[in-house]
Each structure stands twice: as C-alpha cells, then as structure tokens.
Image (cartoon, grey):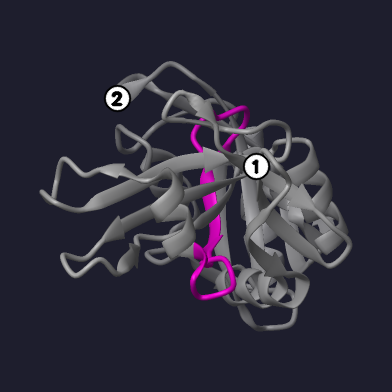
Amino acid sequence: MSYDELIEKLKKIKEMGWIKTHRPGTTGIGKTLEDLLGINENNVPGPNAEMIELKSARKGSSSMLTLFTKSPLPKKANSILLKRFGYPSTKKKGTKRLETTVNALKYNTLKGKPGFKIDIQKDRINLIDIKGRILGYWDKETLKNSFERKLPKLLYVKAETKGEGANEYFWFNEAWLLSGFDFDNFIQLLKEGVILVDIRIGQYPDGRPHDHGTGFRVFPDKLDLCFSYRKRII
C-alpha cells in the first residue's frame, strides 16, 4: 500500500460513517482503525516512502496521552521533591512515595497545603514552591530531544465517538500528518493547562529516589498542536 492509497482508504472510512468497535475498551479505537486499513502494525507508509507511526484518538477524550517521560534536573531534584513532599508508601514499608500532577495554572495540594507548580521561563520550565524557590527544571533542548525521540512523525487520526464498551461506535472523520516539535505551541499548551506533568517517585530501601516516570501528558485531541508541521489529510 502506497501513501496515496492509504489516504484514499482513510477517505473511504470517513464516508462509511459510524463503525462499531472491533474490541471493547481503550484500545478499541486503534484496533478498529488498523482492521479497516488492513494492517497488522501501527507503522504506515509516509509521503516520501518512509514508514511513519499511526495513532488514533477519540475526540474530547478525558484520558491523557503521555508525550514523553523525563526526570527534572538537576539530578538531586527528585530527592528534593521526595524529601519535602513525599508521604509514607503503602507498598513498601519504611519508604516514601510521591504521586502528583502539576500544571502551570495553580499549585497542587500536598499534605493539605500548597505544594508546587510549573513556572515557565524563556528557555526553561521550572518547578517552584509557594515561595518561588526552584525545585527542579527542564531546559528547552532536553524537551525537544525527548519529544522527537518518542514522536518523530505521525499520521494522526481522530474520531467522534458514541456508546461505550462493546457497543462503542467511531466515526473516523479527521486525519493529520504531523512532524517537528513546536516548542512555542508546547509552552502555550502548558500555560493553558492542556499539558500536565505527572510526578511518580518512589524510594529504594536505602533512601535513594526511584523515578517511576515523570511524564508530560496531553489530551489526545490536542496532540497535533505540539507539532510545527501540520497538514490535514482528511
């Protein structure tokens, strides 16, 4: 199948209207689209005979997609966060844990008090406490590299949905060809609270922090706004 043939298939799928899911649950949308396209993997032909990744999303979904994971700098940042805001773990006795979500709109609440939030500067994204002290940060280049390694180029298909479970239906009516990390748009989405950061830190018995994946997450139907090259296909 060539790229042009793939696009023609997507246009025909749009014309089919509502299609019942081929699998109940969150993965149903991807499975259904792959079956309709007649593919077994999520790699599809791109416009320059290269293989690109195929992703699909429910419009208006409340479930978030992880763009990439990256621990904050400096290396001691996780230790600082865990020491100040961690709480006793219910999984490993005698250790601490910190699981929280932060945004740029307001401070999160930890132990009944304001904790920390995202503070956006020109070339950095900081985590600051209520007194404005920097607890950790990410620089622009680090974020750019992390994003492009995880999501270099995509054919991104969006669907209207109705129903649920085994009776969920999809209307695949929008598709975008995406590439190139757009840092300005990424920052704007952070400012608007569309992109959030999930902090997941555990602790080894010897006291060292264990990062379970500090993830930058976005609502799926906003993923296309993170790219500098966006071409609507259907």
User: Does residue 191 appear left or right of residue 22 in this picture?
Assistant: right
Q: What stretch is highlighted in magenta?
A: 58-77
User: Does residue 126 appear left or right of residue 232 in this picture?
Assistant: left
**Secondary structure under badge 1?**
strand
Name the residue tied to disc 2. Answer: 166
Give the amino acid at mark 2. Answer: Ala
The residues tagged by marks 1 and 2 sit, at their Cα atoms, a distance apart of 39 Å
For the residue pair 210 and 162, the one nearer the viewer reads as 210
Residue 233 seen from this side:
no
Helix, strand or loop for the magenta stretch, by majority: loop
Residue 213 seen from this side:
yes
Residue at (35% x, 20% y) in the render: 167
Q: Percent position (x, y) of residue 29? A: 45, 40
Q: Percent position (x, y) of residue 18? A: 54, 25
Q: Would you identify the image quadrant in which residue 5 lies?
A: bottom right
Q: In this view, does 31 lie above or below 7?
A: above
Give the amino acid at mark 1. Answer: Lys
For the residue pair 94 and 121, the one nearer the viewer reads as 94
Q: Percent position (x, y) of residue 180? A: 78, 70
* Residue lying at the far left of the rendered structure: 93
Sooner in the amino-acid sequence: mark 1 or mark 2: 1
**Secondary structure under badge 2?**
helix
How many numbered marks have been drawn onto this rendered protein structure?
2
Q: Is residue 7 above or below residue 163?
A: below
Name the residue tied to disc 1. Answer: 117
Disc 1 packing (10 Å; few <14; some 14–19; many ≥20): many
Q: Percent position (x, y) of residue 96? A: 26, 50
* Residue lying at the far front of the rendered structure: 131
Residue at (66% x, 34% y) in the render: 15
For the residue pair 30 and 131, the one nearer the viewer reads as 131
Q: Disc number at residue 87?
A: none
User: Does residue 200 appear left or right of residue 228 in this picture?
Assistant: left
